Image: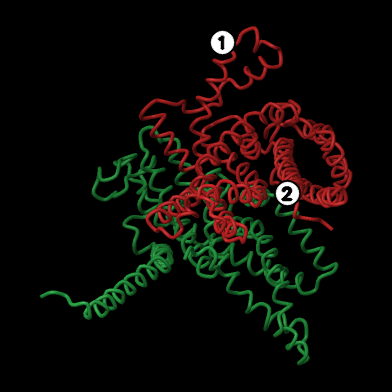
Amino acid sequence: MAITRDALPELTAVGARDDLRDRSLGRQLRRYGPIVIGVLMALTMVVVAAAAPLLAPLSPSAQYADAVLKGPGAQDRHVLGTDEFGRDVFSRIIWGARISLQVGLASVIFAFALGVPLGIVAGMQGGRVETAVMRCADMLMAFPTLLLALIIVTALGGSLVNEILAIGVALTPNFVRLARSLALTIREQDYILAARALGGGQLRIMARHVFPNALYALVVVATLYIATAIRTEAGLSFLGLGIPPPTPSWGNILSEGRQYIKCCPWITTFSGLAIMLAVLAFNLVGDALRDLLDPRLRGE
Amino acid sequence: MINYVLRRVLVAVPMLLGAMSIVFFAMRVLPGDPCVAMMGDQATTEALADCTKNLGLNRPLAVQYVDYLWRSVQFDFGNSLRQGYPVSEYISRMFPHTLVLVLAAAVVAALVGVPIGIFSALNRRNPLIDYPLRIFALLGLSMPVFWLGILLLIVFSLRLDLFPLIGGGDLDGAIAMIRSGEVFTQPRDFLAAVADVLHHLALPALALGFTLAATVSRLSRSAMLEVISQDYIRTARAKGHHERAVVYKHALRNMMVPLLTIIGLFVAIALTGTVLTETVFTRPGLGKMLVDAIGARDYPLAQGAITVFTVIIITVNLVVDMLYAVVDPRITYR
């Protein structure tokens, strides 16, 4: 059957509709794909860390004398091989997720809880308070995160709490600066003026109006800093300044395995891969959230 | 402009002072007695008392603090507890190793990161190009430099035997030849020393450069996106300029201004990276010196290294701020 001229617009319209649906699907995928992947990866990490005793096939500290430095699959019970003490690498990596996640989340919560109120107060109050807070933040920001965390953890000694504290303090100035800049923008808004006109006190305005309005951007950045915290923890442990062995953390598994890269590269390969995937997960979530917020970077 | 420079320097001084104070007090609360670390557990009480007196640790903290600041200004950080040599001498010896690593990594990062960032921004509507490039950047950003270093060592040093496993090459020899003028009388030896340095530098520079390239590509991408949304780019296109001319003549030049401001950030990341990179590749340098000093509780050495790191970062940020004012004439500072 020949297609008549009259039938064409209808066909075109149907085609266009399909095309539009495809494009819209493609756009949705592009827009939400990374965040879905990132959230799934991060959730997997949380589940693995929480259920480590159930998921790890063996104890992370159990030493198998018959399986020292065995490669992946060499023995059925050691899927990712064993280390120099015959400990199961897979189980140690699963338990290591706990440390990484604990340090990652706790240090960011610490930095958030300390930095955000300071930043908001500095931004809202201005004057000497602002100068004092910001100069302190600038001073700390002169040190890169790892270097500052390294100084603090060296002074305090390597332990889980000290590591959280060290990384938390090192991240705090970032939150101070961001919260202050957000507060500076928000304080000029009409609703702040309205809140003042209604007799709202400074503290109430900060808590009920400035903080909730800054929260979205702060959470996005906090997600990205979880990735930084996990990477910094791994770096500290790799340098031998983090949680001391035999407690498994991805950084110290990698550091211990470094001496055996010639014969047994699987120890460093798998522990490093775990670090990378964890950092990638939180980077993906943070990035995707930021892209959704900032239309200029969306590329559409 | 001069006012701005002066004000910026005046702001940098207390910042530097504060940062140095943090270093000083952090080192004072280090667990363990430095004299015990230096002389061992077997040292007698008299010997320990002598050592404490010689190091000036029996003086009030405030006096020690002022002394530390005054001596730091003169680049005198005392002697290393372990080796006995002046810390400043150590730093002078290690600094060139770290400098060449940072420079080589910067070259790798710029050559890889900037084109990727620009290409990704210009093709942001083409997911087949933009997405793989963004994934590359994300992977680079998520990959710890010490892990990438180990992977490179496994493949290129252990499996393929193409690069050395440890060391920094004969950089000291090359520097000595430049100083003595032997570079002109024995050019062949000098070139051999340089080749040795480059041979040792390749993998560390790649490892550090790749992780930096990820940051550079992301920043270049956003800088480019920012620039191509400007009115003058639309004007250039409206005038009928070829897209290539628009990119190279208008966008690229203007993109360099925001990119310049990230040099400070870049130096901070690179210096942190050297701590890990030098440790992985067992390369001499300030970073490895710092880690070793902390491990050995050699706090004058650690203090010296951290102070130098901090001074470098603050100075670079200061210079970048000034360059920013020079490069972009639209910016005026009140």
Q: Identify the image quadrant of residue B175.
A: top right
Colour of the chain lettered A: green
**At 62% from the left edge and 39% from the top edge, which residue is drawn?**
B291
**Label 2 sits on residue:** B324
Sequence-wise, which precedes: disc 1 or disc 2?
Answer: 1
Q: Position of residue B100 (x, y in %)?
A: 61, 31
**In which quadrant will I find the N terminus of chain A?**
bottom left
Mark 1 nearby-residue class (10 Å; few <14, some 14–19, many ≥20): few
Task: Give the amino acid at mark 2.
Answer: Tyr
Q: Is residue A28 above or below residue A6?
A: above
Chain under label 2? B
What's the CA distance linking mark 1 and mark 2?
42 Å
Disc assigned to residue A61: none
- Left/right placement of residue A128 relative to residue B316 reads right
Q: Nearer the viewer, residue A192 or B283?
A: A192
Q: Nearer the viewer, residue A96 or B9?
A: B9
Observer-side mark, 1 or 2, equals 2
Extreme-bottom residue of the structure: A198
Colour of the chain lettered B: red
Q: Position of residue A225 (x, y in %)?
A: 57, 60
Secondary element at tag 2: helix
Q: Position of residue B320 (x, y in %)?
A: 72, 46
Task: Give the amino acid at mark 1.
Answer: Arg
Q: Nearer the viewer, residue B111 or A3?
A: A3
Extreme-left residue of the structure: A1
Disc assigned to residue B188: 1
